[in-house]
Image: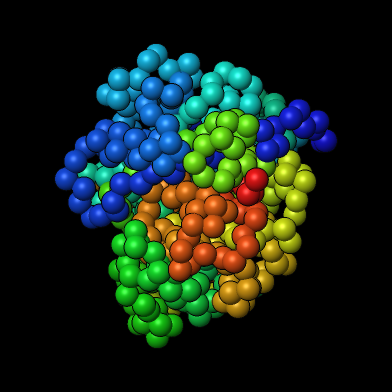
Amino acid sequence: MADRDSAQWWEALRRHEFVVQGCADCGRLRFPSRAYCAGCRSRSWRWQAVEPLARIESWIVTRGHTVVMVRLEAAADCVLYGHWRQPRAPRPGEQVHVAYEDADDVTVIEWRPGNTLAGGRGWN
Amino acid sequence: MTKRLLGFRDRTAVAGVGYTAFSKNSGVSTLTLACEAVLAALADAGLTADDVDGLATHRVGDSAAPSLVGPALGLRAPAWYLDQFGGGSVSHSVLGQAALAVAAGLAETVVCYRAINARSEFRMGQAPNPSPEAQYQVPYGYAAPVQMYAMYARAHMLKYGTKAEHFGELAVAQRAYAVKNPRAMMRTPITLDDYLASRWIAEPLRLFDCCLETDGACALVVTTAERARDLRHPAVLISAAAWGGGESPLSSTDVTTTAAAELAPRLYAQAGLGPADIDVAELYDCFTYSVIVQLEDYGFCAKGDGGPFAAAGTLPVNTHGGFLSEGYVHGINHIAEAVSQLRGTAADRQVPGAQVALSTAQPGYVLPATSALILRRS
């Protein structure tokens, strides 16, 4: 599933670290992982921890399962997907945070309502 | 950036249209379908395989290449061919590239075709998605085109108040056209209530929001405008052909606008025309929402008004029934219908006096690229 551009991102997720790439020259954040900055075309970058907070932009329901599409609060042009496991439907624009779901060989994302930092309980 | 137009507009024409039957199970190979459609298009133009010096198609590993079809039809070594990788996004660029080759004198008679057994042999979504972006989607069960379109449809509904009824009225209108189209796979009228009662496929999209899975082929003969005027049918000129890329869906700041919004001004400038000049629009309708966003991005209404505009039905759209009701041949049957409308041979579904048609490809969601054509009656 992971490729040569994305392997380290998946490894970080496996360690429950939420990172995106940050351009070492212009500072622009990017996701998905790739070698070049689309803003300044620099190839220098570093992994950068960002708050795992996002806003709900849309969702679908397929055979009872809800998948959400969210936009990172830290970077407006970073769109991610994830599971939604709440008993209620998502609300448009609502704030969500990452919860890590560990399967046998991969960790994936569940988006949960709110900002757990506000409750002082950490990210997971 | 302003580009000089070096004599592309109206230099080439579509002179022949050919179809196979559309079905759920053709019982034959895509090579057979391709040959049948190519020969039908040549016969329609009053030409034979001996006149062909170019072949063009697009594929995603699911169909017969020009290098297979050419020898199968005993063509002399083609002067020009195109075997474009891609699906619905590139459907209209195939004809555009054929027109470029003819306009440049590299070939004189190019047949463009698309042949698929998309129900009985290679169903959409069954092949692994080659995009690196799929790895961020598939783990959540988000993989089928209908799910992606459902996601964007809901984003549009949330942002602009687009309603299920808007999708529904469009589906009903396209079915009404299909009722009048002997080629169409779905010829039983539906009502808005039927639409609203149809089952969820990926909420907010229902069964009647979705295109058909089709076995079939369609082919078009492209030649010079000059030569087309000497052939059997009124020449349908290729006034503009444009294609290009948009934003990745994972990096887009506005998922309710597509690559078509960037392409449309280029396309209209090439033709020297605007949305008000379009008499009939054959718009890529893998799902109803695709039409609604394109009505906006091709400038027929303001951003966000595509739902009410589509429901009002003021612009004739997908007069063959579209992918929703005629059949899904990945884009080329939209171009073929535009040609019929401009020839004035669309029988019961003819748009009176149609002079100019717009036809478009997948607007840039599943793959961030699109293509489109403006055709006009000579």
Residue A91 appears in the figure: yes
In the displayed structure, would residue A91 be above or below residue B124?
A: below
The front one of B38 and B115 is: B38
In the displayed structure, would residue A23 be above or below residue B197?
A: above
- Residue B124 drawn at (x, y percent): 33, 48
Tally of marks: 0
The front one of B157 and B112 is: B112
Displayed quadrant of residue B321? bottom left
Q: Is residue A43 left or right of residue B343?
A: right
- Residue B96 drawn at (x, y percent): 58, 35
| Residue occupying the point 62% across, 60% down | B354
- Residue A109 drawn at (x, y percent): 43, 54
| Residue occupying the point 54% across, 52% down | B343
The front one of B24 and B36 is: B36
In the displayed structure, would residue A44 be above or below residue B148?
A: above
| Residue occupying the point 65% across, 56% down | B355
- Residue A66 drawn at (x, y percent): 39, 67
The single residue placed furthest to the left in the displayed view is B27
The single residue placed furthest to the top in the displayed view is B77
| Residue occupying the point 82% across, 35% down | B1
User: What colouring style does the render use?
Assistant: rainbow
Residue A115 appears in the figure: no
Displayed quadrant of residue B76? top left
Q: Is residue B234 left or right of residue B191?
A: right
The single residue placed furthest to the bottom in the displayed view is B193
Displayed quadrant of residue B325? bottom left
Q: Is residue B175 left or right of residue A26?
A: left
Looking at the rendered image, the quarter that the C terminus of chain B falls into is: top right
